[in-house]
Amino acid sequence: MSDKKQECPSCAMMVDADAEACPICGYDLPKTSKSVLIGVWLLILLMLIWVFF
């Protein structure tokens, strides 16, 4: 088990960040893929370059 926690969007209880489902209500916790995170950071970087140059 990890020390990192996240809030369940369904019942608002704190659960382990690496959990696939909430142990309290059974809500399937969403996982963000690395490709989405890379895309978001790339978009932010491109917007910053566009604003400043």
Image (cartoon, rainbow, N blue to C red):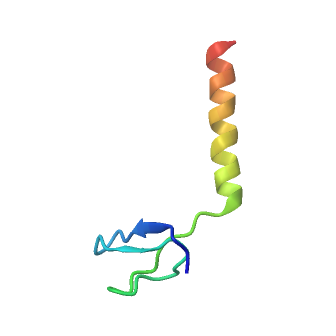
Q: Which of 33 and 6 is in front in this view?
A: 6
Q: In this view, does 13 lie to the left or right of 44?
A: left
Specify the quadrant of the image occupied by residue 46.
top right
Specify the quadrant of the image occupied by residue 31.
bottom right
Q: Which residue lies furthest to the front in this view?
A: 3
Q: Looking at the image, which residue is at 46% across and 83% down?
A: 21
Q: Looking at the image, which residue is at 59% across and 63% down?
A: 32
Q: The N terminus lies in which quarter of the figure?
A: bottom right
Q: The C terminus lies in which quarter of the figure?
A: top right
Horizontal and vertical percent position of residue 18: 55, 75
Q: In this rendering, is residue 52 above or below 33? A: above
Q: Looking at the image, which residue is at 50% across and 67% down?
A: 4
Q: Is residue 7 left or right of residue 38?
A: left
Specify the quadrant of the image occupied by residue 15.
bottom left
Q: Residue furthest left?
A: 11
Q: Residue furthest top?
A: 53
How many numbered dots are placed on residues in this image? 0
Q: Nearer the viewer, residue 50 or 2?
A: 2
Horizontal and vertical percent position of residue 13: 31, 74
